[in-house]
Amino acid sequence: MGDYWNQRFETMPWADVHQYWLEKFNLLLDYVKSNSPFYRKHLAETKAVASFDDLTAVPVMTKSEIREAQLAGDAENPLGTIQVARTEDIVQVISSSGTTGRPVYYGITRKDLESWRESLAAFTYTANIRKSDVAAHVVGTPIFAGGEPYFEGMRHIGATVVWAGGLATERLFETLRNLHCTAILGTTSFDLYLAENCRKYLGVDAKDLGVRKILGGGEPGLGEEPIRDRIKELWGADSVREIMGLADIMPGMWAECDEEKGMHFTAQPHVMVELTDPETGKHLPWEPGVCGEPVYTTITREATPIIRYASHDFIRVEALECSCGRTSPRMRCIGRVDDMLIYKAMNVFPSAIRDVVVTSFKDVLTGYLQVVKDSAAQVRFDKPIPVDIEVLPSVEDKARLKKDIENKVREILVVKIEANLVPPETIPRTVYKTPLVRVR
């Protein structure tokens, strides 16, 4: 295997990958139109595409459309009108988290399952999981995308996989110690939570457990150096890798290589990705510094194919070339399109506020902060955006720190915040994701 799980696709010129996707896309169009009532209507005006730019004429899909199509499900087709394969050919169903409404369910056939195993193996292999690892999967959500599929991917590599997710925290720590785990995979928040609480439960520091590889995702954050450095220090880790996927498409599609400077796309054989302007829908170039929204297509899925899905993630291209030899661009996810806040006429992501604050004042902060809204629907702020920020007890001049933080954010992001400095442990830690925003 060398340094790659799938050398052909991981080192294929990016332009050749696009050509491969186009060929698969046209085959997919014929398949879904022949077998799905939803797609016959949704793609009624869509013809075969001749170039990558022609894809922008194909309508995008949203989660609300998929959810509506699934409401038409019945005993024969439980996944609704987006179900393309026969129910007797579907061997597994996974779910979105359902945090913004009724969960959306996706099926996979036996062939899809093999595709997922290969893709999730390439994904976790890129993130440094090897056959010699005893890898603890600490996400306790079997039906969700971040649950069983990740387990399958690491097991497909040949690693010894321990599903510790869902255990009581003390039992989880005991499992890590008793089985001499070398790697953990969890959300960024939970990876940090475990590291900060190991001594409380086991009487030893996290770095004494021998876990040397940390994989974290499910939310932006691990791309920020202070958070990454803190996780690496607390665990005594040799590698800390950010990972990212999407339940609707492929649970794992982006992972960091040895450079640890952005995530490579790892699902080339089975998923197509386009970089688009979220306002105009037009394609954007994969060039360093360009920011946009990924739009995905499951080009080989049989059971519930998804065509041009608007992810609502907002990413920034970091580089086109990498010393690891992989040819897909490296990127960082900097937020969700629908998480964007507006201060007067300026747009800002909560993750951007965290990045500025934590990076600039890491020596006096715990790393935890939350934007505070008056209501869940609030997007606009005419007054400075309230932000709770945890500070270390050693800080004596809190008034000066508050002013410095507010000035730094205004200087870099051109927005004003109201920094509310709070003691450590004020912001609740969670066993899945720690939200960057809360309602007052």
Image (spheres, rainbow, N blue to C red):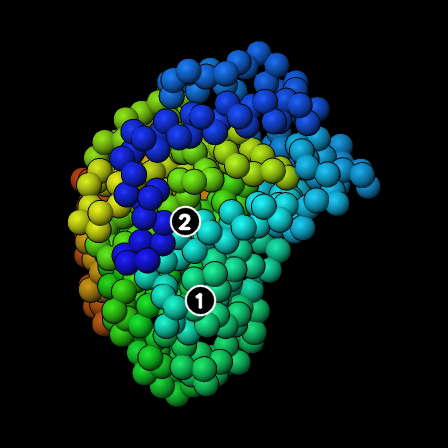
* Residue 313 seen in the current view: yes
The image quadrant of residue 242 is bottom left
- Residue under numbered circle 2: 244
| Quadrant assignment, res 333 | top left
Q: At 27% across and 57% down in the image, what residue appears? A: 3
| Identity, as a three-letter code, of the amino acid under mark 2 | Met
64 on left or right of 11? right
The percent position of residue 63, horizontal first and vertical second, equals 57, 34
Q: Position of residue 326 (x, y in %)?
A: 26, 45
Given the current orientation, which residue lies at the most extreme bottom position? 203
From the viewer's side, name the closer residue of 51 and 319: 51
User: Would you call the spot at circle 2 few (<14 residues within 10 Å), some (14-19), or many (20 or more)?
Assistant: many
Circle 2 SS class: strand
Question: Mark 1 or 2, which is nearer the eye?
Answer: 1
Q: Tell me: 325 left or right of 176.
A: left
Q: Quadrant of the N terminus?
A: bottom left
Q: Is residue 333 left or right of residue 431?
A: left
Q: Amino acid at mark 1?
A: Gly
For the residue labelled by badge 1, is the local secondary structure a helix, a strand or a loop? Answer: loop
Q: Nearer the viewer, residue 132 or 366?
A: 132
Q: Residue at horizontal 28%, vertical 26%?
A: 285
Mark 1 highlights which residue?
158
